[in-house]
Image (cartoon, rainbow, N blue to C red):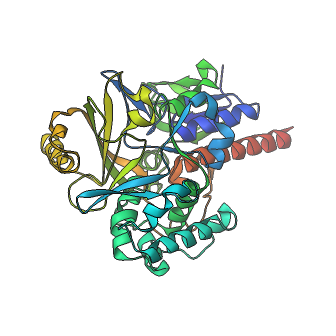
Amino acid sequence: MKPDVIVIGAGLAGLCCARRLQEHGLAPLVLEGSDGVGGRVRTDRVDGFLLDRGFQVLLTAYPTARATLDYTALDLRPFHPGALVRWGERFHRVADPWRHPLEAFGTVFGPVGSLADKLRVAALRRHVLRGSLREIFQRPERTTIAALREMGFSDSMVDRFFRPFLGGVLLDPRLETSSHMFEFVFRMFASGDVVLPAWGMGAIPQQLAAGLPAEAVRTGAAVATLAAEGVRLQSGECLSAGAVVVATEGSEAARLLGGQWARGWNATTCVYFAADTSPVDEPILVLNGEGSGPASNLCVPSVVAPSYAPAGAALISVNIPGDVREHESALVDAVRDQLAGWFGAGVNRWRHLRTYRIPHAQPGQAPPVLAQLERPVRVRDNLYACGDHLDTSSIEGAMRSGQRAADAVAYDLERNETRSG
């Protein structure tokens, strides 16, 4: 049966596009070149451990995710709202005083930033929660580091907290990301929980795909070129449809569509270790406030969600933003040396599980690329595009972009049918 719409790519954008097309009464066919759905949001099982492909979390305040996903079925497990910051050979707690007021005293008088910095965080929180999300993207735009300087944050607060924190979230330790994206993300952190699905981040695209008919998703179906009324696969097979949506990441979109669809990339490397015991006993992010060593931040997913590791074991995720060229054995040794200084010689007994080097982890987000919250999804007649490179570089941006593309397709097809009728 001929599909109404071909969607190229089974990442979050493509799957959300297909789901919305189905809601419009259209029959989508999703073509995925790899062996599974999810795109950059996938989870591998290695020796009984669940390894997300790079450090990823879901922010429950994302509006589209909240409206689209079944959070209960995902069995979401929250991180503690705060962080442990390594500085001065000690760990210092930075807690969210609005959620954990009993921890506020230690945060206010801790060495991570001055008392004035803590007051500025409160002002920042009020600022990002003011107005609508759309209004955030209509404010004056500059880099994140420029915005933090204008707000008056001290060098110590920037280097000990914001740099390692945003280095993990925005994959930008240099803080050159647009202030729009920084304010958007900070608002999401302030408005909801930071969570992991009990069975890995890959459970999110799996849930989306499960809402489609089995025959609506084809894996191992890489698209070679676009054709006049459809696509040609690398196998030589040609498929036709009333419309085509390119739901790939920006570099692949540029190959298929021509032009400049990629905004550049933020890269990251994630090193996973297995241990007998966890180095921390709570579900919290650990930040490198010292500025030395490869690791920017660390977490223990199995403390957040025990299903990430076999019984009696711990899974440690070490995150290194940027394009790391160091040989794997040297990188693992450098990470061990750094963390042994944090947690003691027991780190040397941790077993290296896998290293993920992800050069295309997030589309670049330097200003002025986020001057518009929503970029056009129509390319030309019967051809559309979606993905986080057309919106915020986030799970939310990918999902919303996919739905916007589906709405545009449905509108155009209905209008064309009305005209021809």
The quarter in which the C terminus is drawn is: top right
Instruction: Return the residue nearer the eye: 369 or 419.
Output: 369
Q: How many labels does the image show?
A: 0
Give the vertical position of 203 relative to 68 (above or below): above
**Residue 247 screen position, x and y as percent:** 54, 42
Which quadrant of the structure image shows residue 111?
bottom left
**Residue 169 screen position, x and y as percent:** 43, 53
**Residue 30 screen position, x and y as percent:** 56, 30
In this view of the protein, can residue 151 be seen by the observer? Answer: yes
Which quadrant of the structure image shows residue 375?
bottom right
| Left or right, residue 148 beside residue 229 | left
Residue at left offset 56%, top offset 30%: 75
| Left or right, residue 258 beside residue 1 | left
Which quadrant of the structure image shows residue 207?
top right
| Left or right, residue 313 beside residue 328 | right
Give the vertical position of 362 relative to 111 (above or below): above
Residue at left offset 44%, top offset 37%: 304
In this view of the protein, can residue 137 be seen by the observer? Answer: no
Instruction: Return the residue nearer the eye: 159 or 388.
Output: 159
Give the vertical position of 39 relative to 335 (above or below): above
**Residue 147 screen position, x and y as percent:** 47, 75
The quarter in which the N terminus is drawn is: top right
Instruction: Return the residue nearer the eye: 234 or 411.
Output: 411
Instruction: Return the residue nearer the eye: 418 or 129.
Output: 129
